Image (cartoon, rainbow, N blue to C red):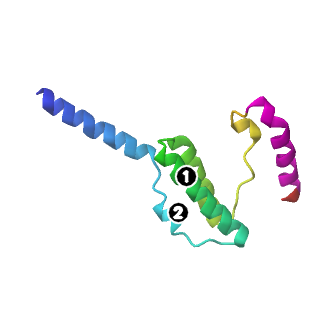
Amino acid sequence: MGDSLRIIGVCILGGLLAACSTNTAPISKMSVKGSDYEKGLHKGYLKLANDEHAESDWSDGNKFAERAKLAAMGKPTAPEMLSARAVPKKHMKPLAAGYKRLNAAM
């Protein structure tokens, strides 16, 4: 009986972990609508999604996969807010300046 419960538990856990991840293969096969900009975003976000999934960071991986999907659809998202990440205080000023320039350029 104990072995049966362990096997059931492992199967349930495996199913839950699989549900947490996003399979990026369909997103990688999407044809990208738009310019080289959207193509670059699509490729870059897919890499980030796969890297985060490889580290078992399902939340960030799924966010990047969604951004890749939107880029492929020709609907790229705005740059992520600096407040979305834990940025050390010493890096905040130069990052904020770069963020401001990026948004102005877009």
Say what amino acid the circle numbered 1 marks: Ala
Q: Which residues are magenta?
A: 88-104
Question: Which label sits in the foreground, 2 or 1?
Answer: 1
Query: Residue at (25%, 33%) from the top-left corner?
Result: 9
Q: In screen coordinates, is 7 left or right of 85? A: left
Relative to 48, say whether 36 is above or below: below
Check if mark 2's residue and mark 1's residue have beta carbons within 8 Å: yes
Q: Main secondary structure of the magenta part?
A: helix
Q: Is residue 57 left or right of residue 43?
A: left
Position above or below: 8 against 45:
above
User: Which disc number belongs to residue 25?
Assistant: none
Q: Residues within 10 Å of mark 1 (few under 14, many from 20)?
A: many
Residue 49, percent across and down?
55, 52
- Write down the residue under mark 2: 27
Q: From the viewer's perspective, is residue 9 above or below residue 21?
A: above
Q: Quadrant of the C terminus?
A: bottom right
Image location of residue 6, percent across then percent down: 20, 31
Tell me if residue 94 is in the magenta stretch.
yes
Circle 2 Cα neighbour tier, 10 Å, few/some/many (<14 / 14–19 / ≥20): some
Query: Is 38 in front, or is 43?
Result: 43
**Residue 17 in the image: x percent, y percent?**
39, 41
- Residue at image location 47% in from the left, 51% down from the top: 22
Q: Which residue is mark 1?
A: 49
Work out which residue is located at the far top of the displayed protein and give it: 2
